[in-house]
Amino acid sequence: MHWSDVVIESLREHEVWHATYVPDAINWQVLSKLEADPAFTVVPASREEEAIGIAAGIYAGGGRAAMFMQSSGFGNTINGLAQLLTAYRIPVPLFIGMRGGLSEFNEVQVPSARPIPAILDELHIQHYAPEREDEVQKYVDGAIELSYASRMPVAVLWYAQLVGAKRATS
Amino acid sequence: MRNWWERNVLRREGIAALVRRLDNEPVIANLGPATFDLYAAGDRDANLYTWGAMGLVSSIALGVALAAPDRKVFVTDGDGSLLMNLGSLATIARQAPPNLVHIVWDNQMWFETGGQPTHTSTGTDLGGIARAAGIPNVARAATVEAFEEALDQAIREPGPWFIHVDIEETGEPRQRPKVVVEENLVKFRRTFTG
């Protein structure tokens, strides 16, 4: 099974029927299939912090939502992660497509991606990064389970080791 | 808008008028005076008070509206906060939840930080932005009567609704609500999950 299908099965298993996102090419492999599946409601936001707010509201309203973004937009989420998800103990599984690592061609992606694990640590948000396809189910199932058990956001980071690096385009 | 002998709405009057009309419908309140005044109108489990994450209150309400499509969802926002998250109007328009009523108390200032004038004080029209973003139902009110009329229509008719209210900031003393945010969230969520 492709890693994106593993994510979708895990969301289904945990009754996470909503997803909010700002698109990136990595997570789009999951999101495009979610959008085509009538069981899921998928909400594109204009900015990452907004997607955090919508996901928080879905949980507050009795549902469950995962949030998808690219590492370059992670900085936009800090206030929502701290003052909303962490302060109110709102579980939201976060899926972050990581640029700025192996074979990165765009230098500005590097300084925004590199500190993400350290920032998550400081916010007391646990994070995991599967590197091989056969690890994805264990990590994603585990992260979603942990998020709802601890009533905290938990992040899964998709690095180039798993998903491949984006090729430079003109 | 209003006659010269009438004064603008007070936020607490508007919030009290809203709460009087509700049963178990959720209200999500912006940080600062909207949260204080909602609490003062009578604490209820279906109130979600915010204390930070400035700007996100309409996004939270959109999420609630999507998760609970069978309930009318009310959000009381402010001009300074909405100016931080104008993209939310476009996202609400795109999702077009018929059960969402977005009320903005516009006092033309960042009240909590000392009353510095916001961009609405120099002519930015939040209702006009909402309309241009694609929100189909936009109302503006400067008196309690006009606000109640718009609110009753928003309760009766499908939305999304955007009600832009010009308010008078009197700066009367306020009691800080005794709320533990984690408990608030748990109680609020239980009004949906039972």
Image (cartoon, coloured by chain):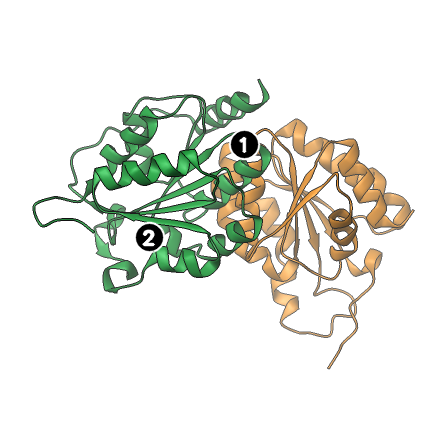
Chain colours: A orange, B green
Would residue B62 be seen by someone viewing this image from the given angle? Answer: yes
Q: Which residue position is annotated with label 1?
A: A60
Q: Residue at x 32, y 51 (%)?
A: B79
Q: Which element carries disc 2, helix, strand or loop?
A: helix
Q: Chain of mark 2?
A: B
Q: Quadrant of residue B84?
A: bottom left
CA neighbours of label 1 inside 10 A, class few (<14), some (14 to 19), many (20+): many
Picture layout, residue B136 above or below residue B33: below
Front residue of A120/A165: it is: A165
Q: Residue at x 78, y 68 (%)?
A: A166
**Drawn side of residue A43 relative to residue B121, left or right:** right
Q: Which residue position is annotated with label 2?
A: B80
Q: Residue at x 12, y 49 (%)?
A: B3
- Image mark for residue B119: none
Q: Quadrant of residue A56?
A: top right
**Residue B33, position as x, y percentages in the image:** 28, 38
Front residue of B66/B157: it is: B157
Q: Which element carries disc 1, helix, strand or loop?
A: helix
Q: Residue at x 85, y 46 (%)?
A: A5
Check disc 1 and give the amino acid type.
Ala
Going by the picture, which residue comes out furthest to the top?
A: B194
| Number of numbered discs overlaid on the protein picture | 2
Would residue B50 be seen by someone viewing this image from the given angle? Answer: no
Going by the picture, which residue comes out furthest to the bottom?
A: A170
**Drawn side of residue B164 relative to residue B156, left or right:** left
